[in-house]
Amino acid sequence: MSHTLHRRGSVESLKDDIVFLMMHAHRYNDVDVPQAELGARLRRFMELGMEKGCICIGNASTGNEYTLGGEQGVLDSTVEGATVHCAFDDQDKAIEFMKALKEEDLGLSVVVSGLFDMLGECCRKSGLTPHTVEYSLGVWGSTSQLPPEPVLEINTMCGHGMVSVGRIQDVIDKIQKGRMTCEEGGRELGKTCTCGIFNWKRAGEILQRITGAT
């Protein structure tokens, strides 16, 4: 199960929302690999993501570029045992990242989340064959108390729920009062997603849809 799996929204909204994570599989692909080398491979994953145009990176163990003083802070904080992430807002850039990962062959486990058909096309174009496929079946049961769908679209971009509904509503209120733009609101919400998987650009677009502001 991946915490990047449960994003909500229309095909149009999700078509350029692609998240990668890398981690080692304990006692499988970390055997006989020095700990310093594991950390170096994880850092290289994020460096490649930055080279190919990802919009944010993060380390589940330490934080994202907002909390660690920028991208270099994330890289410097990454050691063995971490789970690291790169988020993309462009399918072509994600394909180039896949190609780079295939060529680099870092030897650790990679998970990519996004629309099923779109990711299948990305894999074909980058010469990769998925090992395992997971599906999100949505939320079942009594859903009447859930917040409105556009708010859930933003909330579910942080798989650990650290971009709370209350924070989203606060940002919406500030945008409606002219105290911040939609893009600024998206960036502000991304600060509390420690893993760095929050697509702040998409969040800004959803905020614009909710508020009618720019």
Image (tube, rainbow, N blue to C red):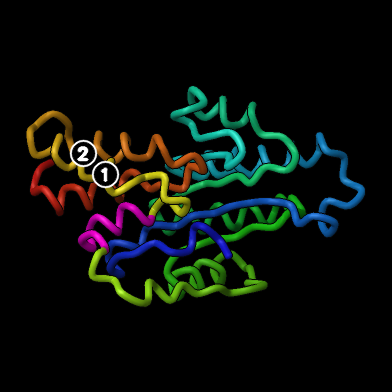
Q: Is residue 189 left or right of residue 4?
A: left
Few, some or many residues within 10 Å of mark 1 (<14, 14–19, 20+):
few
Secondary structure beneath dot 1 equals: helix
Q: Is residue 143 left or right of residue 93?
A: left
Which residue matches tag 1?
Answer: 166
Confirm whether the magenta stretch covers residue 148.
yes
Query: Do the residues under discs 2 and 1 have CB atoms within 8 angstroms?
Result: yes
Mark number for residue 170? 2
Secondary structure beneath dot 2 equals: helix
- Taking depth in this image into account, of 107 and 162 the one nearest to the observer is 162
- Taking depth in this image into account, of 185 and 13 the one nearest to the observer is 185
Where residue 10 appears, as percent x and y from the top left, is 28, 68
Which of the 4 image quadrants contains residue 107? bottom right
Q: Quadrant of the N terminus?
A: bottom right
Q: Residue at x 83, y 38 (%)?
A: 35
Where residue 142 appears, as percent x and y from the top left, is 30, 74
Which of the 4 image quadrants contains residue 92? bottom left
Where residue 6 appears, as percent x and y from the top left, is 43, 64
- Taking depth in this image into account, of 21 and 168 the one nearest to the observer is 168
Confirm whether the magenta stretch covers residue 151.
yes
Q: Residue at x 62, y 68 (%)?
A: 127
Q: Quadrant of the C terminus?
A: top left
User: What amino acid is labelled 1 in the image?
Assistant: Gly
Where residue 66 appears, as percent x and y from the top left, is 44, 29
User: What amino acid is labelled 2 in the image?
Assistant: Asp
* Main secondary structure found in the magenta portion: helix
Cα–Cα gap, marks 2 and 1: 6 Å
Q: Is residue 211 left or right of residue 32?
A: left
Q: Which residues are magenta?
A: 146-156
Q: Residue at x 30, y 58 (%)?
A: 153
